[in-house]
Image: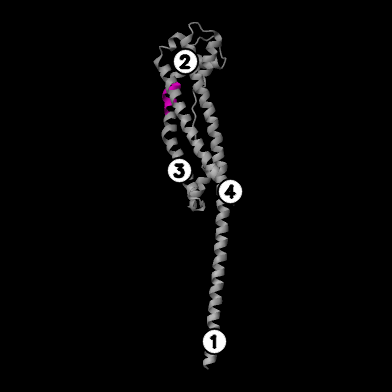
Amino acid sequence: MKNQTSKYFKYAVGEIILVVIGILIALQINNWNENRKINKQETVYLQDLKKDITFDIETLNARVVNNNLMVHNIDTILILISSKKIFTKQDEVLLANMTTTLFGESYFIPEKGTINQIQSSSSGSFIKNKTLRDLIFRYYSNNERIEKNMEQSIQIYQHQIITPSLIHPAIVKKSMNINAEVSLLDMSLLLKNNDYLNALTIKSLGTQNQNIQYLEIIEKAQQILSIINTELNND
């Protein structure tokens, strides 16, 4: 009886050990599958973020080029009206065309499709690289702060101060070649027109400051792209 009891006991212990081993193996397989899913989802997020941020960089580069053109036009206008006493028709058309380029403003809104998806699904933890994760969330929070402060302020100044001070029916007609005989404002009087000069100054300073911000955003975006590429290449 003692031998049989000992055998049954050993058998029961062996069964328990096998069950425990089976459970551990099953848990390991389940963890492996979950990690594989997480890694796959992380790869998808990183690829999509790469597309979004690459699009941001392309957009910002285009904005910088356009802003540089506007600053150049402002400098040319100031030189034109301060250096000449007699203005040709070509001067008038040049002034009109350059002035009309200043009626619009740059405005940057980052591509947020992927980051919104990550935030709405609470899956920020899928990005395992903490440095990368922090840079990404800081990138979007900083861009949102710039949009609410600088970008909206520039837009308000543009619509309420700059464009109304620069626009003039003759300038618009001359730039569109409508009734080319229409006389522009007396060029000599533009130097005495404080509203016009202030509008040019505000436009130039605001645009240059905007470009400084845009170039900083591009630098941060490129840093993020570099880390994302490293992570994708390691998969």
Task: Tell me the magenta residue range.
Answer: 156-164
* Circle 4 SS class: helix
- The residue identified by callout 3 is 138
Q: Residue at x 56, y 43 (%)?
A: 50
- The residue identified by callout 4 is 232
Instruction: Judge whether 18 appears above or below 179 on screen.
Output: below
Q: CA distance from mark 1 to mark 2?
A: 102 Å
Q: CA distance from mark 1 to mark 3?
A: 63 Å
Instruction: Judge whether 105 appears above or below 74 on screen.
Output: below
Q: CA distance from mark 3 to mark 2?
A: 40 Å
| Residue 234 visible in the snapshot | yes
Which marked residue is nearer to the observer: mark 4 or mark 2? Answer: 4
User: Which comes before the other along the chain, label 4 or label 3?
Assistant: 3
Q: Residues within 10 Å of mark 4 (few under 14, many from 20)?
A: few
Which marked residue is nearer to the observer: mark 1 or mark 3? Answer: 1
Q: CA distance from mark 4 to mark 2?
A: 51 Å
Q: Which residue is farthest bottom?
A: 1
Q: CA distance from mark 4 to mark 3?
A: 21 Å
Magenta segment, prevailing SS (helix, strand or loop):
helix
- The residue identified by callout 1 is 8
**Residue 63, how many percent across, how many down?**
52, 30
- The residue identified by callout 2 is 78
Q: Residue at x 55, y 80 (%)?
A: 14
- Amino acid type of the residue that numbered disc 2 sits on in the rendered structure: Leu
- Amino acid type of the residue that numbered disc 3 sits on in the rendered structure: Arg
- Amino acid type of the residue that numbered disc 4 sits on in the rendered structure: Leu
